[in-house]
């Protein structure tokens, strides 16, 4: 049976102890992105890893890989999308549904979806994913870099 993986965020505190679940992740906290494969629970966990380029390569080369090795290239962090919220937002909890940037801690580049680079997979057509900052003429991040988190736990908000 084939199954799409579910992406699990492991906060810096749970890097050593992967049994920790449900911990809050704040803006600026480091975390790992782990693929949870419910199709084969015995499979080793795979982590989203940024591979640095030793020599310049083709522009369409994607430096994002899945790796069983947890090293510094697997560390990610989040920042609020709007520049005016970045300084004040550091350390505050990430709200479900908020627009944010996911950055690699080593490369300081944003995770992005390349909607012009589609691939046919077992699950149908899917976009390529890489690390690159897509910035428009107003120095704002474009849709390729904007993410939102979805959780099975509802985020409480103050009205």
Image (cartoon, rainbow, N blue to C red):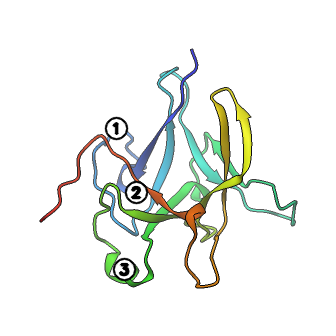
Count the marks: how many? 3
Image vertical order of residue 39 relative to residue 139, above or below: above
- Residue at image location 62% in from the left, 69% down from the top: 109
Cβ atoms under marks 3 and 1 closer than 8 Å = no
- In the picture of the structure, the residue carrying the numbered disc 2 is 12
- Tell me which corner region of the image, top left, top right, bottom left or bottom right, holds residue 18: top left
- Tell me which corner region of the image, top left, top right, bottom left or bottom right, holds residue 80: bottom left
- Residue at image location 64% in from the left, 70% down from the top: 134
- In the picture of the structure, the residue carrying the numbered disc 1 is 19
- In the picture of the structure, the residue carrying the numbered disc 3 is 85
Give the secondary structure at mark 3: helix
Q: Nearer the viewer, residue 151 or 36?
A: 151
Label 1: few (<14), some (14–19) or many (≥20) C-alpha neighbours in 10 Å? few
Label 2: few (<14), some (14–19) or many (≥20) C-alpha neighbours in 10 Å? some
Looking at the rendered image, the quarter that the N terminus falls into is top right
Image vertical order of residue 17 relative to residue 55, above or below: above
């Amino acid at each position: 049976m084939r199954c799409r993986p579910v992406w699990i965020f492991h906060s810096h505190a749970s890097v050593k102890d992967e049994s920790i679940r449900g911990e809050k992740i704040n803006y600026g906290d480091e975390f790992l992105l782990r693929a949870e494969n419910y199709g084969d629970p015995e499979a080793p966990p795979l982590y989203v890893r940024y591979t640095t380029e030793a020599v310049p390569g083709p522009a369409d080369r994607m430096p994002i890989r899945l790796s069983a090795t947890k090293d510094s290239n697997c560390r990610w962090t989040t920042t609020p999308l709007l520049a005016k919220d970045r300084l004040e937002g550091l350390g505050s909890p990430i709200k479900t549904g908020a627009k944010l940037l996911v950055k690699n801690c080593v490369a300081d580049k944003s995770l992005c979806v390349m909607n012009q680079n589609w691939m046919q997979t077992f699950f149908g057509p899917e976009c390529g994913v890489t690390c690159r900052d897509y910035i428009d003429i107003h120095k704002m991040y474009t849709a390729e870099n904007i993410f939102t988190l979805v959780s099975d736990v509802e985020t409480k908000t103050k009205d």
